[in-house]
Amino acid sequence: MVGEEHVSMIPAAPSEVWSAEVNGQNQEVLAPSNAILLDVLRDKAGCLGVKRGCDMGTCGCCTVLIDGEPRLSCLTMAQDAAGCSITTVEGLADGAHLAPIQQCFADHGGSQCGFCTPGFLITSQALLTKNSNPTDKEVACAIEGNLCRCTGYQQIIESIQAAAAIHRGESESARPASDAHPDPHPSGPEEPTMPPGHAR
Ligand code: FES
Ligand code: FES
């Protein structure tokens, strides 16, 4: 009806200050008091590497480390993680240097479309931090909550085992730490220009 004001059926939750250490940096943002951690990380903290797959705890794409433990951010209230140390996939690399688990996924075909990869990397990192010599069965158990529609899992297990060997010091990272990866999406003067007619 013209002029009728829309009245929300569910009152919005009041906003509160939410703060935590995200990838080594203190974050302090305003978020609804009932916000889900996945939303706060993506929409407020800018961590777009945290993927929303199923939004119901079945795919593992949204996995982050909370005080070192892998947790599904789509099932975690942001307030429950306030004050914690949170690591997303953006926090795995050391500056321009990939973590061994990231390098091994790239080298061993552990990632194809890549949508599931952030969750696998975080879950794998949690495993390797606790156990750098896992059996294939232990690897399979660790990643049983992460779904991948592309790789068939064998390459993922091989990637994790290759990273485990690096953690044990039995194998060298494919690229030495001094070999920085160039930023594929540089900004500033190095930013590639788009052809005419293409919106950025
Ligand atoms: S988005 Fe969280 S488990 Fe799928
Ligand atoms: S690489 Fe595509 S879903 Fe896993």
Image (spheres, rainbow, N blue to C red):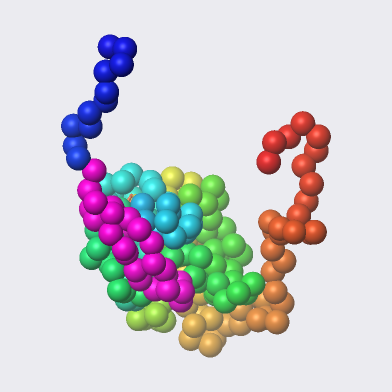
Q: Quadrant of the C terminus?
A: top right
Residue 67 lies, in percent from the top left, at: 32, 76
**Front-most of residues 61 and 197:** 197
Residue 7 lies, in percent from the top left, at: 22, 28
Left/right placement of residue 130 relative to residue 115 reads left
Depicted 89 relative to depicted 48: above or below: below
Q: Quadrant of residue 5?
A: top left
Depicted 179 relative to depicted 73: above or below: below
Residue farthest front in this picture: 3
Residue 188 lies, in percent from the top left, at: 75, 59
Residue 60 visible: no
Left/right placement of residue 52 relative to residue 98 reads left
Q: Which residues are magenta?
A: 12-38
Q: Residue at x 36, y 75 (%)?
A: 85
Residue 30 lies, in percent from the top left, at: 35, 58
Q: Quadrant of the N terminus?
A: top left
Residue 197 visible: yes
**Front-most of residues 23 and 167:** 23
Magenta segment includes 136: no
Depicted 178 relative to depicted 30: above or below: below
Q: Residue at x 52, y 59 (%)?
A: 110
Residue farthest bottom in this picture: 169
Q: Residue at x 39, y 48 (%)?
A: 52
